[in-house]
Amino acid sequence: MSIFTPDLYLHRITDLTPQRLAQHHIRGIILDVDNTLTHHGSQEVTQEILDWLALMKHHGLKLTIASNNYDKRIRPFAKKLGLDYIAMSCKPMTIAFTKACKRFQLPPGQVALVGDQVYTDILGGNLKGLFTVLVQPFELETGWLFRAKRKLEQRHLRHCRIEEQEKE
Ligand SMILES: [Mg+2]
């Protein structure tokens, strides 16, 4: 498996079930924000996401946000969800993930990382030894740099199949 390959590829974060996480002995989740929990730069969050977060907490999963975005963007969002957060987390560097595992008091093998970008979220998560979950972005970015990056990402996902939501 390549360092750019996620352990799991899903349409959206809400397709990730407690059962699936339990299968992999996951007890903590590090969450990306932009295009994973909400639209890029948005402070809004859907009821579906709120329900999913509540479900994860109900199953005893520890949660924290780790975003490369600024503190002033992430702080109010994390506060609204009642989650710990790490802003300016410099993914794919693994410093933020080390910090999150320490906060959780869990080894990397029991922590999942959910994000929408291969070159930051998945690469960093794999380097740290986390269980990496790639989700499709809420929306495709319009800038040329982002579009070029998304095209490159596809090369690493050729052999990855998006798994459908498990029936409960
Ligand atoms: Mg993102």
Image (spheres, rainbow, N blue to C red):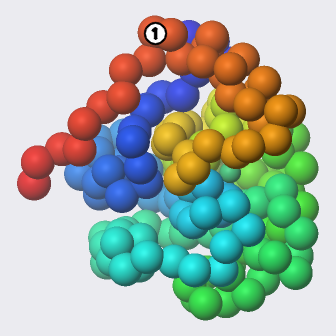
User: Tag 1, which secondary structure?
Assistant: loop
Residue 33 falls left or right of residue 11: right
- Closer-to-camera residue (72/149): 149
Q: Is mark 1 within 8 Å of ligand 1?
A: no
Q: At 78% across and 24% down in the image, what residue appears? A: 148
**Residue 86, image quadrant:** bottom right
Q: At 60% across and 18% down in the image, what residue appears? A: 154
Residue 146 falls left or right of residue 65: right
Mark 1 residue type: His
Q: At 40% across and 39% down in the image, what residue appears? A: 10
- Closer-to-camera residue (115/94): 115
User: Residue 23: x, y in percent?
Assistant: 29, 41
User: Residue 158: x, y in percent?
Assistant: 50, 10
- Residue furthest to the left in view is 168
- Closer-to-camera residue (111/8): 8
Query: Which residue is denoted by mark 1 in the rendering?
Result: 159
Looking at the rendering, in which quadrant would you find the C terminus? bottom left
User: Residue 107: x, y in percent?
Assistant: 61, 49
Residue 111 seen in the current view: no
> In this figure, what is the number of numbered marks?
1
Residue 93 falls left or right of residue 104: right
User: Residue 165: x, y in percent?
Assistant: 23, 44
Q: Is residue 118 above or below residue 48?
A: above
Residue 164 seen in the current view: yes
Q: At 78% across and 52% down in the image, what residue appears? A: 98
